[in-house]
Image (cartoon, rainbow, N blue to C red):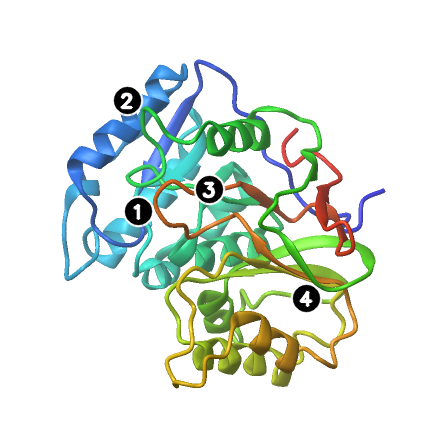
């Protein structure tokens, strides 16, 4: 049974379809980008991107309006069936004033990205009620020889109109027990925080909240979680899933662990909580599981496991 009746599911991607590539954030390594394109071609997909994708402005892949224009054109192009991002980093939030909400709402499509792209996932989900995908970017995780597990879950999520089902990984640990069901939302912790107070602020009521980050001091993580609490974002949630949180360590000299921080700041949040789910930022060789945001999931913190209970595409 659907838990969010108005959600829009994009059409599934089929072999021979065209994937549009956009660069809403950092500029990127051209060789890595080309090897990602080659991999997508080898999987049976056509690829389309704007020549301006290689432009540079500061650390970003061109001026804000240019980068937003790429997104608008890919949503408006009827031949493009899915949109992947070239790179994350920084800059996606600067495209939002130039996005064409009308074009996007009329043309719901698969949209995949993570890290800085989280702000666009929030925007698309909140303003267009669109299922979006927290998954790999072209110039980083996608290449010949990429993790077969990463490829498998990306493919399953966007090419098959079936639930992904149960996902149980050895690195996933329970923090607070219990079992609950809700719609999955979230993404990168820092970007979820930056959305608060905007029109694309994440609605966490009756939701399962996924959060991940990398390289942050534990005091920063603590501050972000306190921000979520004080903003009321943890008041009516159904559960929390934390990612790997690689290199999120204590620099104070007190030798606290991530578990210490999570246990302390979330001690009064009485919902199932797990940490270590392998989606998003990773170190070399680690897997990156694509998570559809906007679909119903079950979180079992005792097992621990996560079950994606409905298809993300139609």
In this figure, which residue is indicated by the disc labeled 4?
204
| Alpha carbon separation for disc pair 1 and 4 | 27 Å
| Alpha carbon separation for disc pair 3 and 4 | 21 Å
Mark 3 or mark 2, which has the lower sequence index?
2
Mark 1 or mark 4, which has the lower sequence index?
1
**Circles 1 and 3 in contact, beta carbons < 8 Å:** no
Q: Is residue 166 above or below residue 303?
A: above
Q: Secondary structure at mark 4?
A: loop
Q: Find residue 112 and report its horizontal and vertical position in percent.
A: 46, 42
In this figure, which residue is indicated by the disc labeled 2?
38
Q: Nearer the viewer, residue 299 or 232?
A: 299
Left or right position of 283 against 58: right
| Alpha carbon separation for disc pair 1 and 3 | 11 Å
Q: Secondary structure at mark 2?
A: helix
In this figure, which residue is indicated by the disc labeled 3?
112
**Within 10 angstroms of label 4, few (less than 14), some, or many (20 or more) residues?**
many
Question: Residue at (49%, 45%) from the top-left corner?
Answer: 104
Question: Residue at (15%, 62%) from the top-left corner?
Answer: 58
Label placed on residue 263: none
Left or right position of 312 against 310: left
Question: Residue at (52%, 80%) from the top-left corner?
Answer: 222
- Please state, as top left, top right, bottom left or bottom right, where the N terminus lies in the image: top right
**Within 10 angstroms of label 3, few (less than 14), some, or many (20 or more) residues?**
many
In this figure, which residue is indicated by the disc labeled 1?
87
The image quadrant of residue 203 is bottom right
């Amino acid at each position: 049974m659907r838990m969010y009746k108005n959600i829009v599911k994009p059409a599934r991607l089929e072999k021979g379809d065209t994937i549009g590539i956009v660069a809403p954030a950092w500029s990127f390594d051209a060789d890595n980008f080309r090897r990602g394109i080659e991999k997508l071609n080898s999987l049976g997909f056509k690829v389309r991107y704007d020549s301006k994708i290689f432009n540079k402005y500061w650390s970003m892949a061109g001026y804000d309006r240019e980068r937003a224009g790429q997104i608008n054109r890919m949503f408006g192009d009827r031949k493009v069936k899915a949109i992947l991002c070239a790179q994350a980093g920084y800059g996606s939030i600067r495209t939002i004033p130039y996005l064409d909400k009308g074009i996007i709402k009329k043309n719901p499509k698969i949209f995949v990205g993570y890290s800085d792209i989280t702000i666009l996932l929030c925007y698309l989900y909140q303003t267009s009620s669109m299922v979006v995908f927290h998954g790999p970017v072209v110039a980083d995780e996608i290449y010949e020889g990429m993790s077969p597990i990463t490829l498998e879950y990306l493919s399953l999520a966007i090419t098959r109109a079936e639930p992904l089902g149960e996902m149980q990984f050895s690195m996933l640990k329970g923090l607070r027990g219990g079992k609950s069901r809700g719609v999955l939302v979230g993404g990168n912790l820092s970007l979820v925080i930056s959305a608060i107070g905007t029109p694309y602020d994440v609605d966490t009521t009756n939701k399962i909240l996924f959060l991940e980050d990398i390289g942050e001091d534990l005091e920063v993580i603590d501050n972000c979680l306190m921000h979520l609490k004080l903003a009321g974002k943890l008041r009516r949630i159904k559960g929390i899933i934390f990612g790997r949180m690689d290199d999120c360590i204590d620099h104070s000299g007190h030798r606290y662990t991530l578990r210490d921080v999570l246990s302390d700041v979330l001690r009064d949040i009485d919902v199932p909580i797990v940490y270590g789910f392998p989606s998003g930022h990773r170190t070399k060789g680690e897997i990156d599981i694509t998570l559809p945001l906007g679909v119903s999931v079950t979180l079992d913190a005792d097992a621990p496991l996560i079950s994606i209970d409905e298809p993300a595409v139609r």
